[in-house]
Image: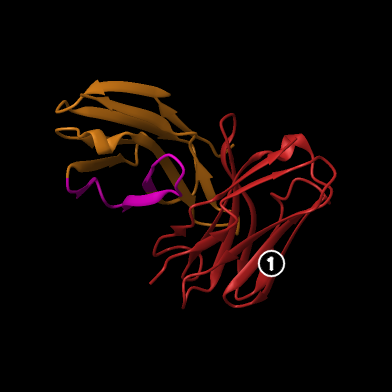
Chain colours: A orange, B red
Amino acid sequence: KNQVEQSPQSLIILEGKNCTLQCNYTVSPFSNLRWYKQDTGRGPVSLTIMTFSENTKSNGRYTATLDADTKQSSLHITASQLSDSASYICVVSALTGANNLFFGTGTRLTVIP
Amino acid sequence: DAGVIQSPRHEVTEMGQEVTLRCKLISGHNSLFWYRQTMMRGLELLIYFNNNVPIDDSGMPEDRFSAKMPNASFSTLKIQPSEPRDSAVYFCASSLEDGAYGYTFGSGTRLTVV
């Protein structure tokens, strides 16, 4: 069964600290993995997208890693800011099928001063 | 580019009433996705259009839900009759082809059925 699981479900960190969010998936055949940031009351916005051959991709203070062998991905946020408070959603695409997107339920990150 | 535009932003309606949610795609995108988001289930794909044609509607909960794409830039999602369990945030997203180049989400419509 194609599934995407994220952890932790929620996280509270102090401003300026680093944090790492986890995503494990069982989607097969794998096409790509995306991390989205969703601010409260807004739609998800893409942060990174990685294909099978990519191990890491950065977008400013966000760095995503992918281990296609263990089917794990992480999103590392460096020097967190208050504006990083949001839900972070991991989305995995399968190679086949029209309905080929599988969503994690997200990690709710709160950055406090 | 104004992005994907959804209306209304919020909708509160009584059980049994018809609800219509609207979405305008980004110019040039040819794929349109309707999603429902709840705390319990996260984002769920309801229906996917490509070039105005519904490709996969297996995520549509039941016959009370229907979606149309009357032209290349506009779509509606209709719930008739609405029920309290339909309360959720409904997003539409558009992309080029099947989303290989990424998806752009609208800001969503928060639906509350009382």
The x and y percentages for residue B32 are: 57, 65
Would you name the residue on which mark 1 appears? B54
Say whether residue A69 is left or right of residue B37.
Answer: left
State the residue at coordinates (16%, 34%): A78
Q: Quadrant of residue B39?
A: top right
Residue A107 sits above or below residue B56 on the image: above
The x and y percentages for residue A37 are: 36, 43
State the residue at coordinates (31%, 34%): A85
Say whether residue B47 is left or right of residue A80.
Answer: right
* Residue type beneath disc 1: Pro
Q: Nearest the camera: A84 or B63?
A: A84
Q: Is residue B33 magenta?
A: no
Residue A41 in view here: yes
Kind of element beneath mark 1: strand
- Write down the chain letter for disc 1: B
Q: Which residues are magenta?
A: A34-60
Q: Residues within 10 Å of mark 1 (few under 14, many from 20)?
A: some
Residue A20 sits above or below residue B67 on the image: above
Q: Quadrant of residue A24?
A: top left
Residue A71 in view here: no
The x and y percentages for residue B21 are: 66, 57
